[in-house]
Image (cartoon, grey):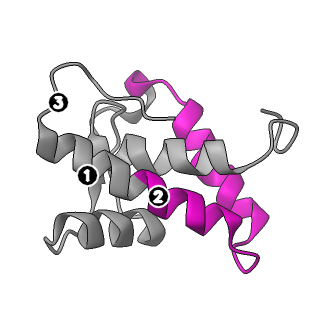
Amino acid sequence: MASYDDDWTDTQRALYDECYRAGGEWAEDPDTPSDDVQHVINLAEADDDAFNDAEIDYPPLVDAVTQASGVDVTSVPARHDDPGFRGFADGVRDAVADDVFGL
């Protein structure tokens, strides 16, 4: 389910949508280790204050943002107001069943 910030531009919404799709596909891939899925869910559930303006270089997330944006990125801001981070994390979280991973 799309979870946009009200002040996002159409470009930011499109980035969210593409990263959401990529996150869901990645989580549903049988070759994706369940520990990796749990890691992203933990990131999605964390409070932004826990990140202290960190950048994440987690390869599936970076690849999703790079592909969606067309810009070669090496890290993504670990903030829920970042459309790439939030889109990927939301996509992963929504792709797994509610009874999986303690959701």
Marks 1/3: CA–CA distance: 10 Å
Tell me the residue that label 2 is attached to: 21
Main SS class of the magenta portion in the image: helix
Marks 2/3: CA–CA distance: 18 Å
Q: Is residue 48 left or right of residue 90?
A: left
Q: Magenta stretch? A: 20-49
Instruction: Answer with mark 1 or mark 3, whichever residue precedes in sequence.
Output: 3
Q: Residue at x 36, y 73 (%)?
A: 63
Q: Residues within 10 Å of mark 2 (few under 14, many from 20)?
A: some
Tell me the residue that label 1 is attached to: 15
Residue type for callout 2: Arg
Q: Residue at x 35, y 49 (%)?
A: 17
Q: Residue at x 58, y 66 (%)?
A: 25
Q: Is residue 25 magenta?
A: yes
Residue 29 falls in image quadrant: bottom right
Marks 1/2: CA–CA distance: 10 Å
Question: Do residues under tags 2 and 3 come within 8 Å of each other at their CB atoms?
Answer: no
Q: Residues within 10 Å of mark 3 (few under 14, many from 20)?
A: some
Residue 41, position as x, y percentages in the image: 63, 44
